[in-house]
Image (cartoon, rainbow, N blue to C red):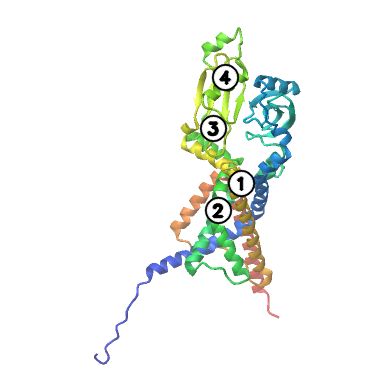
Amino acid sequence: MVVGEPKTIEVIDKAAPEDRTTRWAALRPLLLRLHFYAGVLVAPFILTAAITGLLYVLTPQLEEAMYGQQLHVPASEAQVLLSTQVNVARNALPEAELKAVRPAASPTDTTQVIFTAEDLPESYYRTVFVDPHDAEIRGVLDTYGSNQALPLRAWVSELHRGLHLGDLGRIYSELAASWLWVVVLGGFALWFGRRRATRKFRIRPPGRTRVLSWHGLTGAGIGLGLLFLSATGLTWSSFAGGNIAKLREALSWETPTVAEGLPMRVSFEQSSRRIDIGYDQVRQVAINHGLTGRVEISPSEHIGAAYTVQEMGRSWPTQQDSVAIHPVTGQITDSVRFADYPLMAKLSRWGVDAHMGLLFGWLNQVVLAVLMIAVISVIIWGCRMWWLRRPTRGFGNPPARGAWRGLPEPVLLGGVLVVIGVGCAVPLLGISLLAFLCVDALLGMRARAAADEGASRPVG
């Protein structure tokens, strides 16, 4: 080696890892701030929805215990005509209008004769429970919805959906569903980013770090379930639900139904003389056509309308076939098989039933119960983390405002467009996010003003 010869310096190119680190360093504070404030905003709503949802999951068994007198009868070989059972129920509620009949599905079940009444709220019905063996009335209860929820489940359902506050109360559940997926996706990104940095999965030492570990690990474990509940919950909402309904209509994703109307020629022939085959023959025709489980028979209300029979089996496999039956000839005038539903209509049916704990019976209930308990735990751990690092203990505030300024311009522009689009599709999310940004900006202005005032104050 020649004296004075410059040493060779090996240059290691670390541009790619540094770029990745820089991008994550710019994005993480924004995600952390959004996750924190979104959690603070919706935690009370999600906690309420989780607790009331847990109560709802338990209601089928509670109904069986509380309303056994109305739902069940001793088995017997004697059988009263279905039309006779309907007439007995009509006589019990002469002022009400018959809506549908659900024949006893087994020898130990009652027949449910469902009426509408002017004194009931929307989607509520008055149901007469009739013993199919001797036509004894076993009770009269107000029921709710297409699932015939009895008073207890109807009360819990309304508590879960709107806290018994009417349309105003429904804002709480829609706000929770609107923000839930945002919190989950942000949490996913933060958790995987943290795991990628440490590359270890372990329970941390006692204190805030351990609480953070449990919060992140449990949240990641139930994340997919929460996304599912958020998506299906939005279908019931007032504002986003309306947009979803319009999208399904535009894409022909709606649930098909049988045509209740009859050909005009037949209607004119019936106008002079009405001969109705009655509920017993309608039920037999439906059985012959393969509708052998629990069904609901809607009456032929006027000349030119058919009876409709709809299967009500919503566990797995789903039984939702339906037929329209001529009230004079007993012929099938139209039919819809669940197997022929559009894929999105099937997914919608399965999603709603799974959300309600109906799709796989008690197994579905257990999964939902575990999910709700996990959600409650994650929220409690989140509040605990804030308490352990609250500003009054000297740990400072959440990530600084203006974290978005560190994002690359293409990412920032794309993010703004996505936020605008999502805000239009999910209005409560957009409105609440705008309100949060305004409040955050005002707090930032107040903090800067206080800092400027402190800096300009003379020392001593």
Say what amino acid the circle numbered 2 marks. Answer: Val
Residue 79 numbered tag: none
> Element type at marker 1?
helix
Instruction: Decide which of 388, 368 is in the foreground and name it.
Output: 368
Say what amino acid the circle numbered 1 marks. Answer: Gln
Which residue is identified by label 4? 306
Q: Label 4, label 3: how many angstroms apart (C-alpha)?
A: 18 Å
Say what amino acid the circle numbered 3 marks. Answer: Gln
Instruction: Decide which of 155, 12 is in the foreground and name it.
Output: 155
Tell me which label, 1 or 2, sits earlier in the chain: 2
Tell me which label, 4 or 3, sits earlier in the chain: 4
Which residue is identified by label 1? 365
- The residue sitting at 65% across, 22% down in the picture is 82
Task: Categorize mark 4 by other alpha carbons within 10 Å: few (<14), some (14-19), many (20+).
Answer: many
Tell me which label, 3 or 2, sits earlier in the chain: 2
- The residue sitting at 50% across, 37% down in the picture is 346
> Element type at marker 3?
loop
Q: Label 1, label 2: how many angstroms apart (C-alpha)?
A: 25 Å
Front label number (4 vs 2):
4
Which residue is identified by label 2? 182
> Element type at marker 4?
loop
Is 203 rendered above or below residue 115? below
Which quadrant of the rendered structure holds the C terminus? bottom right
Front label number (4 vs 1):
1
Q: Which residue lies furthest to the left in this view?
A: 2
Q: Is residue 405 visible?
A: no
Residue 320 numbered tag: 3
Q: Is residue 7 left or right of residue 343?
A: left
Say what amino acid the circle numbered 4 marks. Answer: Ala
Task: Categorize mark 2 by other alpha carbons within 10 Å: few (<14), some (14-19), many (20+).
Answer: some
Q: Which residue lies furthest to the front in this view?
A: 77
Q: Label 4, label 1: how many angstroms apart (C-alpha)?
A: 37 Å
